[in-house]
């Protein structure tokens, strides 16, 4: 075979091999891109996103859109061609697979975690909105989860109301860990609780549960460097609301819609329009006290919001610098730290006082 022909054949075979590698060899990356945005004041899949009964509500126009980020699944294996295309695209982001799914997290585990965070964000949104309206909400500390194989398994249960630890009244979830870690591993700690079944029965009867029981648990040692005493639970907060608030939005997870849900609830419960008919989108976690926290994928969410038609984007203060680096044209980023900040900004927006807005950048 002539040398030139052999060289061309070898080059062709190498090119074919490289193309095959580009298509079939997986790389350890995942893709993030703008996801759907949904108006919390409107309908989704044929029904209102916010459904309130037992309290007078008011019609609201305009948009208060929550925003999302779409990510590739845990078991999806990206090839080099897709990775390069994603790096070059303006409206997507390629990240290491472990960033989205650390420690081998499965798709099922990720979905469950996102669903739990989404549920908690809805509860916090309801609390924050009602507190802003001075509507009383009853709250108490509960056992949120029990870790399998730890001392509390079979002794405490999710939904148990924690009244006290070692006789000290519990007022906040953080009190539980503080009181447990006062012990050394191997020492006993006493939980005074209202069992979940008793609490559920009392709520159904619209009464206050009074039956408590003491549960004594021997602490274990944590597997981190601190070697502190643990019992293997996480504490959370549960609430009773004076009327029913349902949030109907499937196939969405994570905590980042909290702020926009809270604003939607507030708008539905007050006369007039918070937005003045303007298209406002946003993001941010929310605490029961109305504090707005940062989220991931902020640049992708601003792109998704602007593509949908948003004029203003309520941005958590801690995300402002990242969001301002590449703001879509025609979108104003408004910095917020609390739900009160957001309400003040919306007042300026509907009044046309945009020069007074606290902007990112």
Image (spheres, rainbow, N blue to C red):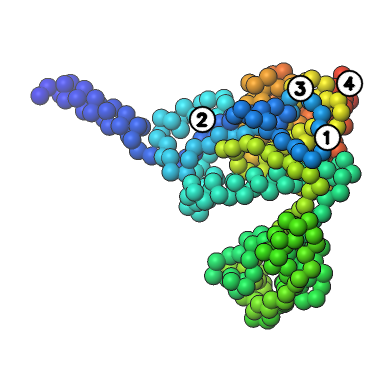
Q: Under tag 3, what secondary structure?
A: loop
> For the residues marked 2 and 4, what is the alpha-carbon distance in whole angstroms?
41 Å
Left or right of 124, for residue 92: left
Is disc 3 in contact with disc 1, using a CB cutoff of under 8 Å? no
Q: CA distance from mark 3 to mark 1?
A: 20 Å
The quadrant where residue 59 appears: top right
Residue 158 in percent (x, y) is at 64, 62
Judge depth for marks 3 and 1 and give the one in front. Answer: 1
Residue matched to label 1 = 56
The residue drawn where x is 43% and y is 43% is: 75
Vertical arrangement, residue 65 with respect to residue 150, above or below:
above
Place of residue 222 in the rendered image (x, y in percent of width and height, measured from the top left): 62, 70
The residue positioned 64% from the left and 44% from the top of the image is: 118
Q: Position of residue 136 (x, y in %)?
A: 86, 49
Q: Earlier in the sequence, mark 2 or mark 1?
A: 1
Q: Which residue is mark 2?
A: 87
């Amino acid at each position: 075979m002539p040398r030139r022909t052999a060289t061309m054949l070898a080059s062709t075979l190498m090119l074919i091999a490289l193309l095959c590698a580009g298509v079939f060899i997986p790389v350890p990356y995942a893709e993030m891109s703008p996801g759907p945005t949904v108006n919390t004041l409107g309908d989704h899949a044929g029904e209102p996103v916010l459904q309130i009964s037992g309290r007078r509500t008011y019609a609201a126009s305009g948009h208060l859109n929550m925003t999302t980020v779409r990510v590739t699944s845990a078991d999806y294996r990206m090839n080099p061609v897709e990775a390069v295309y994603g790096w070059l695209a303006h409206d997507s982001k390629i990240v290491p697979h472990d960033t989205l799914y650390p420690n081998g997290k499965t798709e099922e585990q990720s979905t469950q975690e996102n669903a739990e965070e989404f549920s908690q964000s809805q509860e916090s949104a309801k609390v924050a909105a009602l507190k802003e309206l001075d509507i009383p909400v009853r709250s108490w500390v509960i056992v949120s989860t029990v870790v399998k194989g730890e001392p509390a398994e079979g002794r405490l249960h999710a939904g148990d109301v924690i009244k006290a630890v070692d006789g000290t009244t519990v007022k906040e979830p953080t009190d539980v860990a503080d009181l447990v870690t006062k012990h050394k591993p191997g020492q006993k700690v006493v939980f005074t609780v209202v069992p979940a079944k008793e609490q559920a029965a009392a709520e159904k009867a619209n009464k206050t549960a009074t039956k408590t029981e003491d549960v004594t648990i021997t602490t274990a040692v944590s597997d981190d460097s601190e070697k502190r005493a643990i019992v293997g639970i996480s504490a959370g907060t549960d609430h009773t609301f004076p009327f029913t608030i349902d949030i109907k939005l499937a196939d969405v997870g994570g905590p980042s819609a909290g702020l926009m849900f809270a604003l939607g609830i507030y708008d539905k419960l007050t006369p007039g329009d918070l937005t003045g008919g303007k298209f406002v989108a946003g993001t941010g976690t929310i605490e029961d006290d109305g504090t707005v926290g940062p989220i991931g994928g902020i640049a992708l969410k601003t792109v998704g919001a602007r593509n949908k038609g948003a004029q203003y984007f309520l941005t958590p203060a801690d995300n402002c610098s990242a969001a301002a680096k590449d703001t879509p044209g025609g979108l104003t980023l408004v910095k917020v730290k609390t739900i009160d900040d957001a309400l003040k900004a919306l007042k300026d927006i509907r009044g046309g006082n945009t020069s007074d807005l606290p902007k990112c950048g």
